[in-house]
Image (spheres, rainbow, N blue to C red):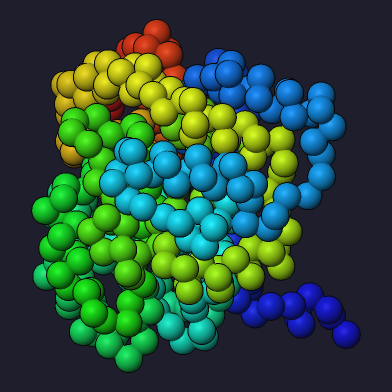
């Protein structure tokens, strides 16, 4: 008997992250500049670190309520209201999670039954796809590459009609990883008009909300509160990726069910990290501003430099990524380009094919690194492109 043959069948159709595997491989190349990072290159603010240190020194090392510390939930509720005009009852409408990844897993696990489908606009951060499949769901891709990387309401409506008997949810991620494109209020209202009143959840991953460049981030939770489950946290806004604190916000009856999945998985998020997040939400509402300004400066250097080399770029308006279409001489294989660039120019970028339909022929370039390193990377890339003319 081979026990491996009796494991969860959905796992057999999945493989570990291509991004992590590629990142590991290119890390072995000496002197490589990695423009692959999906996390801020800044430190967690001192006042946030001190809050966690204080909790440790006071021996605050016990379980919290599964939903999270009451003070953290209140601070998160206030933060979301002050920033995005969404009001969530901290007692019944907020769940603290071990990062947004757990939030995605708990949300999809709580709403999907085998055979349900999830509409996923692509290119997009690939996490949603395997989690949908692990829960017996079917990803339904809507390619946005020809529409400025925005989900158009007509294409959403067509996808819903084509899967009318099975569609359970749509996923939004904005500002978007990998493109940096974000949604306006008008964009969100058009999407809301398509799904309003239907038995369809909107899962709105807004983890990059505080890194919106022009104008104010608009939350789908404001536009369509009765159907929207919002995911957010402190990873990107306060440079706290390793602290693993996220949040889920939504209607109380839905949150009660999601809370069960969270409780069965991890009981509660790490206590001192929750204390730190409470400090971040309460007294660090503008902590993202220096990062945002730095990312704008880097974007404004990188985008024209790439265009000069022959890349086509949708100018990002948030996060810290450029999604660049390859110059014509390189064809459309993003994997071939990324491998050659890494080995010949010692610059690492992420192949666009890893982000689903519409991603092939592009690469994701992260500017979450110093401007000096970006300038050196641009110099190397320009020489590489010129050598392949």
Question: Quarter of the image holding residue 258?
Answer: bottom right
Between 81 and 177, the one lying in front of the other is 81
Residue at 11 percent of width and 53 percent of height: 186
Where is residue 342? Give x, y as percent: 47, 29
Q: Is the N terminus in the top left, top right, bottom left or bottom right quadrant?
A: bottom right
Residue furthest right in the image: 1
Q: Is the C terminus in the top left, top right, bottom left or bottom right quadrant?
A: top left
Between 267 and 89, the one lying in front of the other is 89
Horizontal arrangement in the rendering, residue 267 relative to residue 167 (left or right): right
Residue at 54 percent of width and 47 percent of height: 73
Q: Is residue 179 above or below residue 102?
A: above
The answer to whether any part of residue 334 appears in the image is: no
The answer to whether any part of residue 217 appears in the image is: yes
Where is residue 63? Give x, y as percent: 78, 49
Q: Is residue 28 above or below residue 193?
A: above
Residue at 28 percent of width and 46 percent of height: 85
Question: Quarter of the image holding residue 327?
Answer: top left
Q: Is residue 165 above or below residue 268?
A: below
Between 93 and 25, the one lying in front of the other is 93
Residue at 27 percent of width and 55 percent of height: 222
Question: Quarter of the image holding residue 60?
Answer: top right
Between 319 and 68, the one lying in front of the other is 68
Where is residue 309? Give x, y as percent: 20, 23
Residue furthest top in the image: 372
């Amino acid at each position: 008997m081979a026990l491996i043959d009796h494991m969860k069948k959905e796992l057999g159709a999945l493989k570990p992250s291509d991004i992590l595997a590629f990142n590991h491989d290119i890390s072995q190349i000496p002197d490589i500049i990695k423009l692959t990072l999906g996390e801020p290159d800044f430190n967690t603010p001192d006042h946030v670190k001190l809050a966690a240190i204080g909790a440790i020194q006071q021996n605050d090392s016990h379980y919290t309520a599964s939903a999270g510390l009451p003070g953290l939930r209140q601070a998160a509720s206030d933060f979301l209201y002050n920033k995005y005009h969404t009001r969530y009852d901290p007692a019944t409408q907020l769940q603290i999670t071990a990062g947004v990844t757990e939030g995605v897993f708990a949300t999809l696990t709580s709403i999907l039954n085998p055979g349900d489908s999830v509409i996923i606009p692509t290119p997009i951060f690939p996490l949603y796809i395997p989690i949908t499949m692990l829960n017996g769901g079917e990803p339904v891709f809507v390619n946005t590459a020809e529409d400025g990387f925005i989900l158009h309401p007509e294409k959403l409506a067509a996808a819903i009609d084509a899967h009318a008997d099975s569609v359970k949810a749509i996923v939004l991620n904005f500002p978007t990883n990998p493109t940096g494109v974000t949604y306006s209020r008008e964009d969100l209202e058009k999407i809301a008009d398509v799904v309003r009143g239907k038995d369809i959840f909107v899962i709105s991953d807004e983890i990059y909300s505080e890194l919106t460049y022009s104008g104010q981030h608009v939350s789908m939770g404001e536009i369509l509160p009765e159907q929207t489950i919002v995911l957010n946290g402190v990873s990107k806004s306060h440079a706290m990726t390793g602290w693993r604190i996220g949040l889920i916000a939504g209607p109380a009856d839905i949150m009660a069910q999601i809370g069960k999945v969270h409780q069965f998985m991890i009981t509660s998020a790490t206590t001192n990290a929750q204390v730190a997040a409470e400090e971040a939400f309460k007294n660090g509402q503008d902590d993202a501003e220096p990062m945002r300004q730095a990312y704008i400066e880097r974007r404004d250097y990188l985008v024209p430099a790439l265009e000069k080399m022959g890349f086509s770029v949708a100018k990002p308006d948030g996060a810290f990524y450029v999604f660049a279409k390859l110059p014509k001489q390189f064809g459309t294989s993003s994997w071939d380009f990324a491998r050659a660039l890494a080995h010949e120019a010692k610059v690492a970028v992420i192949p666009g094919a890893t982000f689903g339909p519409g991603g092939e022929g592009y690469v994701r370039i992260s500017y979450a690194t110093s401007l000096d390193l970006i300038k050196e990377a641009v110099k190397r890339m320009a020489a590489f492109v010129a050598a392949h003319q």
